[in-house]
Image (spheres, rainbow, N blue to C red):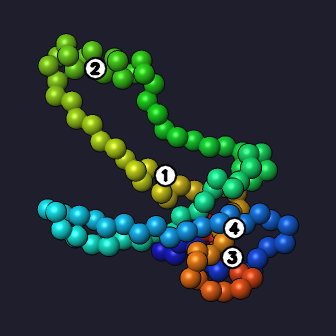
Amino acid sequence: MNTFQVVPRPKGRKVVSSKIVFTLKMRYGRVDRKKARICARGFSQVYGKDYTDSFAAMAHPSAIRLILALAAQHGWYLNSTDIKVAFLAAELHEEIYMEPPEGFEEPSRTLQPDG
């Protein structure tokens, strides 16, 4: 599965900057593995021009209160989790062009996500 393709820089299109984020995954207090990922720096985009929608999943407070009340009433055990990659492989409906990160030397070229 390819993540992006290198394409010529498009004329008249905004190109989003990017950076590489490095992470150490720890296990039992020791480094288990090293990870790197390329991240688009979308804060440079303008609403209505570069994108039209944004979405962040969020539970409504009344739904949370209902679940807590039911759990208390029935003696249920509750557990929570934080899902960080929920939209990692979301389909894009817009064409997005991203500046290659520092160290990726290919003049006048950009990255375009595979879709």
Q: Which residue is mark 1?
A: 87
* Element type at mark 1: loop
Q: In the rendered view, does 34 fall on the left or right side of 109? A: left
Using the numbered discs, state the Cα–Cα distance from disc 2 to disc 4 in whole angstroms.
Answer: 44 Å
Q: Earlier in the sequence, mark 3 or mark 1?
A: 1
Classify 19 as above or below 80.
Answer: below
Of all residues, the one furthest to the right in this rendering is 12
Q: Which residue is mark 3?
A: 110
Discs 3, 2 touching: Cβ within 8 Å:
no
**Residue 97's x, y, as percent?**
69, 67
Amino acid type at circle 3 is: Thr
Q: Nearer the viewer, mark 4 or mark 1?
A: 4
Amino acid type at circle 1 is: Phe
Q: Which residue is mark 2?
A: 68
Q: Looking at the figure, which quarter contains the C terminus?
A: bottom right
Crowd class of label 3 (few under 14; some 14 to 19; many from 20; radius 10 Å) = many
* Element type at mark 2: helix
Indicate the quadrant where residue 54 lies. Answer: top right
Q: Earlier in the sequence, mark 1 or mark 2?
A: 2
**Residue 114's x, y, as percent?**
60, 70
Q: Earlier in the sequence, mark 2 or mark 4?
A: 2
